[in-house]
Amino acid sequence: MLRIHFTPEDLTRVRVAPGPDFLWEITNSVQTLQRTDGERVFGAWRRWVRPRLPESRRLLSPLLPPRGYSPDFLTPTSGDRTTLRAAVDTLLGTPRPRLRAELTRLAGTRRLPGWAAALAEGDPDALARLGKALHAYQAEALVPHWRHVRAALEADRALRTRHLMDGGTEALLAGLGPDVHWRPPVLEVTYPVEQHLRLNGRGLVLQPSFFCWPTPTTLADGDLPPVLVHPIHHSADWADAAGAPERAAGPRPLGRLLGQTRADLLRATRAGCSTVEAARMLQVTHPAVSQHMNVLRAAGLTTTVRTAGRAFHVATAEGRALLAAEDRRAGRG
């Protein structure tokens, strides 16, 4: 059992991450790939991805066992994580003492390959090899599915926002799934080991993860910024998309009507998003977001609220109806 201890101050400092975290999705998917459970959710993806995996999997799998301890440095909580390159650069800048300590702890639970010793000492060649492996794995295993991953996490964020608006922070915490129970002032999470995380006023980031399975996870070091990574609900069409992402990646009906970028922006506004968040999610420039939002707003599909110098975009009733119609047509409603 993982027990997360809250103070009254912590309850005011709970926030939901704005979108997928590249390195959490990589680490969780590498672990899920090595498991045999969750066949209904991940079976088609496993069968699709295994013959396509680059050599990088052999480098990543020993560092990310399917169960038990994994090094925290592989999922940094600080630095720029808005792009994979920035996140990997932060990871590769991990201080040598931390690399050595965490890899030594991992070596105490399983036998590591010889190159891990060089990585533990911060060898530049070993770090560069790890960085290339992360980029290669993302490109081959996750990028073909990334649109689906991002859309699913946007839907989960909308659900968490609704819980927060309807019932406050306690409803947000209580609605994280069957493996999470809110027993004030402690959040109890089904976990493979006994662990206590005392927030002590630091708050908590709730990070939804597409490939987190089967229960939530957190960092092993309680002194790091607190985060709870939790599984999301997977829609019925995921198995089909996972088995044939090349076919599923084609424009959906709304994309053919509005253009793919505007359709993706409209989906992002279902939960509400700022210009900065939309640009990060879709990997386009801020001016491009503003231009497309002007078109959506003129069509009556979104509205924009400006506060403290920021533009916040929300789908109108007409926009949500259009999205709901697409969901029903695709069998997701």
Image (cartoon, rainbow, N blue to C red):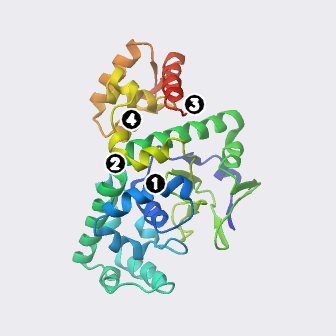
- Mark 2: few, some, or many residues within 10 Å (few <14, many ≥20)? some
Q: Secondary structure at mark 3?
A: loop
Badge nearest the viewer, 4 or 1: 1
Picture coordinates of residue 117, whole percent (x, y): 33, 85
Task: Tell me the residue at 45%/32% (across/down).
Answer: 268
Q: Which mark is residue 278?
A: 4
Q: What residue is shown with label 3?
A: 333
Task: Pick the residue in front: 119 or 147.
Answer: 147
Instruction: Looking at the image, tell me whether mark 3 or mark 4 is earlier in sequence order.
Output: 4
Name the amino acid type tagged 2: Pro
Residue 160: which quarter of the image? top right
Name the amino acid type tagged 1: Ala
Instruction: Looking at the image, tell me whether mark 4 or mark 1 is earlier in sequence order.
Output: 1
Q: Which mark is residue 144?
A: 2
Q: Secondary structure at mark 4?
A: helix
> CA gap, disc 1 to disc 3?
22 Å
Q: Secondary structure at mark 2?
A: helix
Instruction: Looking at the image, tell me whether mark 2 or mark 4 is earlier in sequence order.
Output: 2
Picture coordinates of residue 194, whole percent (x, y): 67, 73
Name the amino acid type tagged 3: Gly
